[in-house]
Amino acid sequence: MKRTIGFYIEFAAAVVGLVSAGLYGSSMIITKNTYTFIIAAAAVAIISSFAATKNPKVFNWGAPLAACLMAAGIAYSITVMSDPIGYFISGLYTINDLKTWITFMIVAGVSWLLYMIAGFTGMVREA
């Protein structure tokens, strides 16, 4: 089995996802559930991408599942930050108060997009 570009994209998405977890640590409001979803997505991606080299028909599901987990982490961080976002809209907070969370959202969104791309490309192909 030869690794395809999807294998490397999924691995890069896992690394970017772990970087986003590090950025999330400096956000205004932090929850363990968001960390859990992001780290679970990276673990599923890494395990499935390396296992796909042994049995590609079973383990090509890793990238779509990791994308779902990453989307859940992003959605959960949005729900937790709904009050600070409202305070920003009303003028009680400035953009500097939300800057680290916005940076996390951008990096996490890139990770999610890479998972989606990897899900459509496949991990391995026949030699």
Image: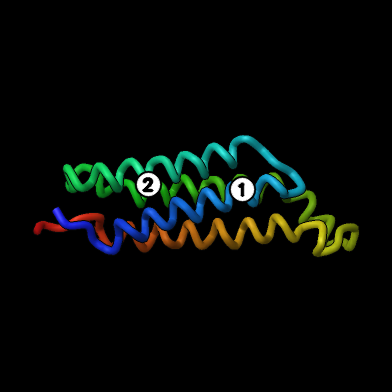
Residue 77 position, x and y percent, is 64, 47
N-terminal of the pair, mark 1 or mark 2, is 1
Q: Secondary structure at mark 2?
A: helix
Q: CA distance from mark 1 to mark 2?
A: 18 Å
Q: Secondary structure at mark 1?
A: helix
Which mark is in front, 1 or 2? Answer: 1
Specify how the rendered protein is coloured: rainbow
Q: Residue at x 74, y 61 (%)?
A: 99
- Up the image or down, 79 lies above or below 126; here it is above
In the picture, measured across the screen, residue 108 lies left or right of residue 117, that is right
Residue 116: name its quadrant: bottom left
In the picture, measured across the screen, residue 69 lies left or right of residue 45, that is right
Residue 102 position, x and y percent, is 68, 60
Q: Which mark is residue 52?
A: none
Residue type, numbered disc 2: Ala
Residue type, numbered disc 1: Gly
Identify the residue under disc 1.
Answer: 22
Classify 10 Å Cα crowding around label 1: few (below 14), some (14-19), many (20 and above). few
Q: Residue furthest left?
A: 127
Residue 126 position, x and y percent, is 10, 57
Which quadrant, please, contains the C terminus? bottom left
Q: Residue at x 51, y 52 (%)?
A: 17
Identify the residue under disc 2.
Answer: 45
Residue 85 position, x and y percent, is 77, 56
Asked whether the beta carbons under mark 1 and mark 2 sit within 8 Å of each other, the answer is: no
Q: Residue at x 37, y 46 (%)?
A: 45
